[in-house]
Every structure is written in structure tokens, then in C-alpha cells.
Image: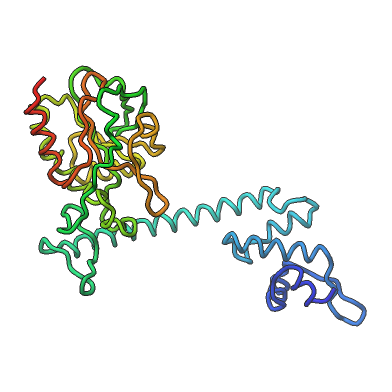
């Protein structure tokens, strides 16, 4: 077949075919008149070069795969030399990823420092912040309404459910021990340099997870003195995400991860959906001897909620 037909069948250009020939990767037969005559094997080799290119393996490094096919193997990566090329490509990608990750971390640090230099955010354009300050709240946040979604919870026993904590251990919810435990449940904490879901501030009760968490941190010793045997934060974010928050905010208590929202399924806890995510609505459980004694729902404003819990504990001594 002619070069144009080979190029069409393999999904490449005739210029690419000539380049492969110049590297000795394909070697067509020659007719008596000197014209090149490409066969089915050349089509297969050219298709393999194209497929490897889509994986990021450059043309110049495809020879082991082509030699594997030429040797009669059904697949181009069945030979040891092909596997070695895969490993080399993976190692190079790993090094590039590590380098890019380090550069990104430095850029995020510079962004955070620049945005908060002087104790305030620097706008990029009028009305647009360089990054969001998650520790403060806008003045016009919409307040959530009591939809009755938590009215059934008082008197309910916590289920036998193991959730991972930020200290690496697993917490069993039905075995928290005697006395009172505070579990505040929230949708999503923001992270510096990472955008929140679109329209986050317009969702009643969504914004304010970081100020709420800081409140529980700042009142932690007071809560223990008022009778709480322990405090836990809980959301559907993965443990690594939670651990970053715990370390950045210097939290003295554990954050629990429930990415499958198992507790919501067991207890019928309220959730909401946004940007393809299903998240917990904000509420707090006061658990006593394994039974839900009191529920705070809805919660607003979230930055004052820890003080509300503290006041309740003091007004309702054991």
C-alpha cells in the first residue's frame, strides 16, 4: 500500500510516517520501480507508535515495543525491554510530579502570605478577593430555617459505627464512654488556595465551618470544665483533608471523617447537595451515655455556636 493509505489507516500524517522511517522504526519493502510498499505489519507498528505517544512515550523510545511485535509477540509490551521503558517513563513522571507539587506548595504559600500581608486580604480587582479568608464571615449570609429534619434525634442511640480520626485511630461512636460528648457536624471546611463550591455563600447554613471549628478550639477547655468528656468535629471530607485542617488550626480534639455519610444513613441526618457533592447540614449532637440528649439545629451564626453549646452545658449540669 502507498504511504497515504498507511497514514489514513494508522491515524497519522504522511510526514509522521516519513519521520518514523528516518528513525528506522518502520522499513517498507521496495518495489521494482523503487516505490515504497507498506504492509499490514507497518500499519500495526505505526498504530503502536501512535498509541504509545498518547501515553506520553516519545517516538524515539518506542523501539523496544516495536521490536517486541516484530519478534512475533501479540502485544508490544510483553517483552522485558518494553516493561523497562514503562518503568523509566513512570519514574520520570514521578519526578516531574514531585517537582510540580513542590512548586505548587511554594506558590500557595506565597499566595497565602501575600493575600494576608498586613492582616487583610488584597483584592485583585474591585469586588474580587485574591483568596477567601475562611476565618471570618460575610455580613449578609443567609440564615438556615428549621425544617424539622433533626426533630427525631433526641433519645436516639448512636449506632455502632467506626470512623477514622485525624490522630490515626478509629473512633467507635457507640462506645464513646460514660458522660457527655459533643459532636459538631458540618458541611465543608475551606482551605487556603482552594476554591469553595460555586455559590457557597448563598446556601443557608453552608459558610462558616472554619470559624465554628475555631470556636470549639478556643472554648475547648471551658467545654471540658462544663461537663463535656470529649469534643469531635465530623464531616464527609477524607481523613487527609481533615488532618490538614486540624494541623493548620492547631485543634486539641479529633476530626472524624465520614465520606460515605454512614451516620446520616443510620440516624437520618439532614444533608444537602451542591456542585455534585452531598454534604452534611450543620448540626451538633450532645451525646450522653451513648444516647443523643440534645440537638442544636439549625445553627446560626456558626462562629458563635461553641459559646451556645458551652452555655447549654452550664445551664444543664449532669
Q: x, y percentage for residue 147?
A: 28, 42
Which quarter of the rendering shows the C terminus?
top left
Q: x, y percentage for residue 216?
A: 15, 38
Would residue 236 appear left or right of 304 to someone viewing this image?
A: right
Q: Residue at x 67, y 48 (%)?
A: 80
220 to 53, vertically: above or below: above
Which quarter of the rendering shows the N terminus?
bottom right
Q: x, y percentage for residue 145?
A: 24, 46
168 to 125, vertically: above or below: above
The single residue placed furthest to the bottom in the displayed view is 33
Q: x, y percentage for residue 85?
A: 60, 54
Q: Residue at x 36, y 26 (%)?
A: 162
Q: Residue at x 17, y 52 (%)?
A: 135
Would residue 133 appear left or right of 264 to someone viewing this image?
A: left
Q: How is the image coloured?
A: rainbow
Name the image quarter holding residue 58: bottom right
**Which residue occupies the foreground of this view, 169 or 103?**
169
The single residue placed furthest to the right in the displayed view is 32
**Which residue occupies the foreground of this view, 22 or 1?**
1
67 to 161, vertically: above or below: below
272 to 222, vertically: above or below: below
How many numbered markers are drawn?
0
Name the image quarter holding residue 119: bottom left
Q: Residue at x 79, y 66 (%)?
A: 42
Name the image quarter holding residue 267: top left
**Which residue occupies the foreground of this view, 71 or 312?**
312
Amino acid at each position: 500500500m502507498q504511504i497515504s493509505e498507511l497514514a489514513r489507516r494508522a491515524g497519522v500524517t504522511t510526514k509522521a510516517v516519513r519521520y518514523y522511517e528516518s528513525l528506522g522504526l518502520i522499513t517498507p519493502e521496495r518495489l521494482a520501480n523503487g516505490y515504497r510498499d507498506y504492509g499490514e505489519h507497518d500499519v500495526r507498528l505505526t498504530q503502536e507508535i501512535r498509541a504509545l505517544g498518547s501515553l506520553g512515550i516519545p517516538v524515539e523510545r518506542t523501539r523496544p515495543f516495536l521490536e517486541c511485535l516484530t519478534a512475533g509477540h501479540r502485544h508490544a509490551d510483553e517483552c522485558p525491554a518494553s516493561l523497562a521503558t514503562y518503568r523509566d517513563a513512570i519514574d520520570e513522571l514521578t519526578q516531574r510530579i514531585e517537582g510540580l507539587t513542590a512548586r505548587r506548595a511554594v506558590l500557595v504559600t506565597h499566595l497565602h502570605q501575600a493575600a494576608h500581608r498586613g492582616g487583610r486580604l488584597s483584592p485583585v480587582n474591585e469586588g474580587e478577593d485574591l483568596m477567601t479568608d475562611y476565618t471570618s464571615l460575610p455580613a449578609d449570609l443567609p440564615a438556615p430555617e428549621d425544617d424539622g429534619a433533626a426533630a427525631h434525634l433526641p433519645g436516639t442511640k448512636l449506632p455502632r459505627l467506626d470512623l477514622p480520626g485525624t490522630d490515626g485511630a478509629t473512633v467507635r461512636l457507640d462506645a464513646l464512654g460514660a458522660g457527655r460528648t459533643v459532636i459538631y457536624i458540618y458541611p465543608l471546611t475551606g482551605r487556603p488556595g482552594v476554591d469553595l463550591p460555586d455559590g457557597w455563600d448563598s446556601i443557608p447554613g453552608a459558610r462558616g465551618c472554619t470559624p465554628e471549628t475555631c470556636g470549639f478550639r478556643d472554648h475547648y477547655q471551658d467545654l471540658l470544665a462544663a461537663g463535656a468528656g470529649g469534643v469531635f468535629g465530623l464531616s464527609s471530607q477524607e481523613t487527609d483533608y481533615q488532618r490538614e485542617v486540624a494541623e493548620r488550626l492547631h485543634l486539641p480534639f479529633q476530626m472524624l471523617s465520614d465520606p460515605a455519610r454512614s451516620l446520616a444513613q443510620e440516624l437520618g441526618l439532614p444533608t444537602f447537595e451542591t456542585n455534585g457533592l452531598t454534604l452534611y447540614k450543620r448540626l451538633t449532637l450532645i451525646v450522653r451515655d451513648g444516647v443523643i440528649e440534645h440537638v442544636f439545629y439549625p445553627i446560626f451564626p456558626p462562629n458563635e455556636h461553641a459559646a451556645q453549646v458551652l452555655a447549654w452545658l452550664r445551664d444543664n449540669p449532669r
